[in-house]
Amino acid sequence: QYGRSVTDPVSVDVREAALVVEGGGTAAADPARFELLFTRAFEFALDNGASRVAVECDEGGVTITGDGDPPQGDTERYFDYGDAVANTTSGTALPMVRTLTQVHGWDVWIDPDYEDGVRLVVSWAAPRIE
């Protein structure tokens, strides 16, 4: 780190997936937490079988869409730690995404009408009303 040679390398999972970013804008956010939010959302998409992840931005928020397996059952369970998904990594990804959105005063949910994979909706506009 910081110009020093790597002395204890570890295996790093490198997967092939396309990342597409559409639109643009800004959000008032803590940069490190914002980056972690996207990292965990991408991890979930890849663990869910996505070969393509699209990020669409507008003034009200962002959607992160993976073409992997569509959610099964109650989509709110995906935000619970552990029991809704097959492995530990993906089982903590969306709960962390939710926590990171909440600390910013935002909201996140899985789009229940999207059937070609999983679409996460992060809204930094008014909270959604169910």
Image: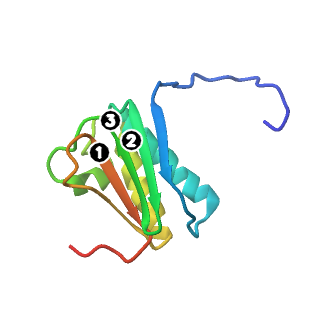
Q: Tell me, yes or no, whether the two marked residues, 2 and 3, touch with CB atoms within 8 Å.
A: yes
Query: Which picture quadrant has residue 80?
Result: bottom left
Q: Which residue is mark 1?
A: 118
Dot 3 crowding, Cα within 10 Å, few <14, some 14–19, many 20+ = many
Dot 1 crowding, Cα within 10 Å, few <14, some 14–19, many 20+ = many
Asked whether 53 or 73 is in front, the reply is: 53
Q: Helix or strand or loop: what does disc 3 sit on? A: loop
Q: Which residue is mark 2?
A: 44
**Disc 1 and disc 3: Cα gap in Å?**
8 Å
- Locate residue 40 relative to residue 84 in the image: left or right: right
Name which residue lies at 45% across and 48% down. 55
N-terminal label among 1 and 2: 2
Work out whether 56 lies above or below 2: below
Q: Image quadrant for the N terminus? A: top right
Please state which amino acid type lies under the numbered disc 2. Answer: Phe
- How is the rendered protein coloured? rainbow
Q: Tell me, yes or no, whether the two marked residues, 1 and 3, touch with CB atoms within 8 Å.
A: yes
N-terminal label among 1 and 3: 3
